[in-house]
Structures are given as C-alpha cells and as structure tokens.
Amino acid sequence: MDNYDVVIIGAGPAGSTAAKYAALGGAKVLILERDREPGIPVRCGEGVSEKGLSEFIQINKKWISAEIDVAEIHSPNGEKAILRNNGKGYILERRIFDNELTKLATKNGANILTKTDAIGLIFEDNKIVGVKIKHFDKVSEIKCKLVIGADGVESRVGRWAGLKTHLLLSDLHTSMQYTVTNIDIESNKVQFYFGNNLAPGGYAWVFPKSGDSANIGVGIAADKLGNKSAKDYLDKFIKRYFPNAKIHCQICGGIPTANRLERIFADNIMLIGDAARQLNPITGGGIIQGMIAGKIAGEVAALAVKKKKYTADFLEIYQKRWDRKLGNTHKIFYKLKKRLFNMNDARFNRLIEECQNIPENKSGLRIIFLRILRKNPTMALKAAKGFVLGK
C-alpha cells in the first residue's frame, strides 16, 4: 500500500509506541525503519525503571539482562555513596525489547517496512502530504495525512519540516560505550562515576548485563572535550577500573541533554523521543520518556484522523499534553543538570560525603537532588516528586 493516515519514521520505543496507539485509535499506520530490524544497532545504556516501563508492556524476563535495586555514586576522590531507595530498575536487551514493542504495534493493526530510509518529505501547496523513501535502492513515495518523526537525535524529519532542531554545544553530550566481558561486578547494582578528569561535564556508567559483563560508557559535555575524544576518556576509565575487561562491542553517538524543542509539532507533523529532545537532561536516558511521548502523539494522531484535522492549531494538543505530563519535570531536571555538571570536584566530594551519613532506609537518588537544590526548596520538592517519571 502507498497511502496511509500516519507514517512514523523510526521503529525505536517511541515510534513503535506511537504506532500502537495510533492504530488502536483506528488510524491506518506505517512504520519506516532504516535498519533490517528494530533495536539494532543498540545505542544506549539500556537502563529503565520498572514503574515507567510497566505502563506500556508486561514485563518479560526474555528481554531483561539484569534487575537493579542499588545505585552506587562514586565521587572524584574515590569515595562512594550507596543509594537503595530508587525503585526497581532493569537493564534491557534492546534488540529483543524493541522487537517486542514493534510486535505489539503490528498486532494492533500497524504495518512496518524495514530496510527503508526516509529521504525526504513530500509537499503539495506547502503542505506535507507524504514521505519519499528508498527501499532496496528503489526510490518511491508514500502518501499520508500525518508524519511522526521518531528518527533519533540526528533527526532529519524536523529539519525537513522547518522546525528548529539545533542544539547548543553545552547541551550535547558525546558518548562512547563498550559492552565488555571478563569482569566481576554485582548484577543488581548500577554505578556512576563523576570527576572532571574522568568525565568533564558528565559521568561514566557501569550497567551490569550479568555478573561478568556490563555496558560501560562515558558521556562528556561537547563543549568540554578539548582535544580528547569520548573514546580517550573511556579507554582511560576501563584501564583504571576494569583492566582485564574484554570488549565485545562498542557504540558511540550524541546525547541531547537539553530542554525539549521549542515546538515539537507543525502542520501535518509531530516529533517524538530523541528527535524532540524528550530525554532526561541529567542521565541522558530517554526510553520511558520516548514511550510516554509516543503514546500521547499516537492518541492525538488517531484523534486527528477521526476529526480530519491535521493543522498545527489542532496538533498543538500533543505538546500541551506532553508538557502537562513531563514538561515541568523536564525543565527542572535541565536546571539541575547545569548545577550538577558544573560542580567542581571538591563540592561533589562533599556532597557524596554527606550522603554517606544518611541512614540506609532513607538513602536514594532523590537525596542527591535535594542536597544540590537545598537553597531552592520549591525546586527541590518538584524534582523529588518528578524523579520516577524523569528516570
């Protein structure tokens, strides 16, 4: 078929979720995925919260590598705080997980076309009426009433539609991650390492996949890289903390740690997930945020089809619903990110020292937020309340 109500570009968690809810609402939906299957290549740490995930899919151990109930925060001077009251989390197997989300979308009526690259939007009388695609070297056109851009941080869809998608250098983290084996770690614990010599303007992470393998990576603020690369910092980190590790695979990319775009919609188009900058500005995690945005956008798309209203005036309800759900939390976390990543090492050492004195039954990542924002109790309270949704 070459005519749909909704075409979604990108079959990640955001895109597949949008497809599911648009199809459930009665729209004829097509997902375009440029790779041979959803979930490859894996381009994230794969960590999610159980509370956020369970809203969208029944938990299945076949796409879970590890269950997490402890977070360990390491300060620049080598001290650490162990935080236990963060709720259950998971480290996913994204390839399997993303495929399951796509299956949910297709079971509910959506269609998917893989090995298909969107190469442009089709305009008639300055209105988007479809997508130009390249599928097995053949260029063709697919007509539609709505386009949903779920094509990641490097999104071209937004630019094609004339939306402002630029990022400040300080709001972009360049990252490098290795999946490694031959290490000895606790499979229920995630670790975060801070320090301006270790990961300036960011942090290093260790997310266990099992007792002897993990995703280990670094995210560095792009404006603080200097003449080094993220790989330089990661290699140094691995050599120091996991000298016997064997690299199984490696990924690199950019992570937007910004506020959401000023506008994430226009006539006949909506942007979701990384393409709309709907990530946690502190952690860079965006799986749950993308799925929340996907659900909202999918529901709005189905409503637009029913009402035959595709203009920006109507689609603005998508942005309004997103802002009511997560927008305020996102803004607070963006401000918190600036404070956290601009701390000098001495201040961060003191922060971790303070957290070490907190009773175990009260410890948690919320405590970090409260301590950082102690001079602004209103913001601290909002950050604590929004923590679970913001993960």
Image: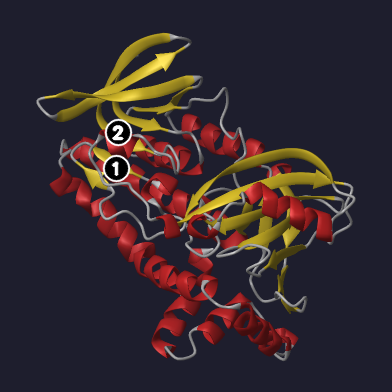
Q: Is residue 375 left or right of residue 201?
A: left
Per the rendering, the mark at residue 102 is none
Q: Is residue 263 left or right of residue 219?
A: left
Instruction: Identify which residue is drawn at 72% across, 56% down.
Output: 207
Q: Is residue 141 left or right of residue 214?
A: left
Identify the residue at the far top of this view.
Answer: 138
Provide the residue designation for mark 2. Answer: 147
> Mark 2, residues whose alpha carbon is within 10 Å: few (<14), some, or many (≥20)?
many
Task: Looking at the image, tell me whether mark 2 or mark 1 is earlier in sequence order.
Answer: 2
Image spot of residue 76 (x, y percent): 70, 74
Residue 59 appears in the picture as rendered = no
Instruction: Identify which residue is drawn at 64% across, 83% down.
Output: 346
Provide the residue designation for mark 1. Answer: 270
Depth order, front residue of 67/208: 208
Depth order, front residue of 93/44: 44
Asked where in the image residue 119 lies, by quadrant, the reply is: top left
Check if mark 2's residue and mark 1's residue have beta carbons within 8 Å.
Answer: yes
Image spot of residue 253 (x, y percent): 55, 43
